[in-house]
Image (cartoon, grey):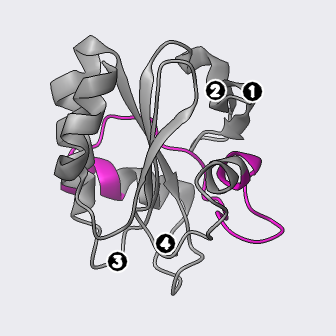
């Protein structure tokens, strides 16, 4: 099964079929605006800018499951990301990433990486051009630490 078989609502509420990203290398991350790791938005944006012309797309999924560190509305989240970190990569609607209400995409990502629940904000998954999970990066691993994995797939 590929990530391209899933869909998710964008931050503006439109349903996005992930098959729109077929053939791209993806970084999929759950995010939060009020977390000690929030500055990782800067690193994710830098990766997006550096590799977009070679086929990388970063997808951000705001999540309020961890200590309620994403409390705002969709508009507030989007504005915060753009104003504070210059985020131009696609953002999606706030989503659960663990439990019964987890977004099916995240259930798939977790299952494909051994079944261990997502521990915190900014768990990152690198997806190859065929839509398969290439590697999972835990929250404290910086976006910059993913560069060699991304380059190997581009």
Q: Reply yes or no: does residue 79 show up in magenta.
A: no
Task: Tell me what residue is drawn at x 64 percent, y 48 percent.
Answer: 112
Q: Which residue is mark 2?
A: 18
Q: What segment is highlighted magenta in the picture?
A: 80-107
Secondary structure of the residue carrying numbered label 4: loop
Crowdedness near tag 3: few (<14), some (14–19) or many (≥20) residues, C-alpha within 10 Å: some
Q: Reply yes or no: does residue 96 show up in magenta.
A: yes
Q: Residue 41, how many percent across, how many down?
A: 27, 54
- Mark pair 1, 2: CA separation: 7 Å
Crowdedness near tag 2: few (<14), some (14–19) or many (≥20) residues, C-alpha within 10 Å: some
- Mark pair 1, 3: CA separation: 31 Å
Q: Which residue is mark 4?
A: 70
* Quarter of the image where one finds residue 141: bottom left
Counting residues from the start of the chain, the first of labels 1 and 2 encountered is 1
Q: Residue 21, how many percent across, how many down?
A: 54, 19
**Which label lies toward us, 1 or 3?**
1
Q: Which residue is mark 1?
A: 5
Residues tagged 4 and 3 counted as in contact (Cβ below 8 A): yes
Residues tagged 1 and 2 counted as in contact (Cβ below 8 A): yes
Secondary structure of the residue carrying numbered label 2: helix
- Mark pair 2, 4: CA separation: 23 Å
- Mark pair 4, 3: CA separation: 8 Å
Residues tagged 2 and 4 counted as in contact (Cβ below 8 A): no
Q: Which residue is mark 3?
A: 35
Counting residues from the start of the chain, the first of labels 4 and 3 encountered is 3
Secondary structure of the residue carrying numbered label 3: loop
């Amino acid at each position: 099964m590929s990530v391209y078989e899933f869909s998710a609502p964008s931050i503006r509420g439109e349903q996005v079929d992930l098959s729109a990203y077929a053939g791209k290398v993806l970084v999929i991350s759950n995010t939060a605006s009020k977390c000690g790791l929030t500055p990782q938005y800067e690193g994710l944006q830098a990766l997006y800018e550096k590799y977009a012309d070679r086929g990388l797309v970063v997808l951000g999924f705001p999540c309020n499951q961890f200590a309620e560190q994403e409390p705002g509305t969709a508009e507030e989240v989007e504005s915060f990301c753009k104003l504070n970190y210059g985020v131009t990569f696609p953002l999606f609607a706030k989503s659960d990433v663990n439990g019964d209400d987890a977004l099916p995409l995240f259930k798939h990502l977790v299952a494909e990486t051994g079944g261990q629940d997502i521990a915190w904000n900014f768990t990152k998954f690198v997806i190859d051009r065929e839509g398969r999970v290439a590697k999972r990066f835990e929250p404290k691993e910086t976006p910059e630490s993913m560069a060699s994995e991304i380059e190997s797939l581009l």
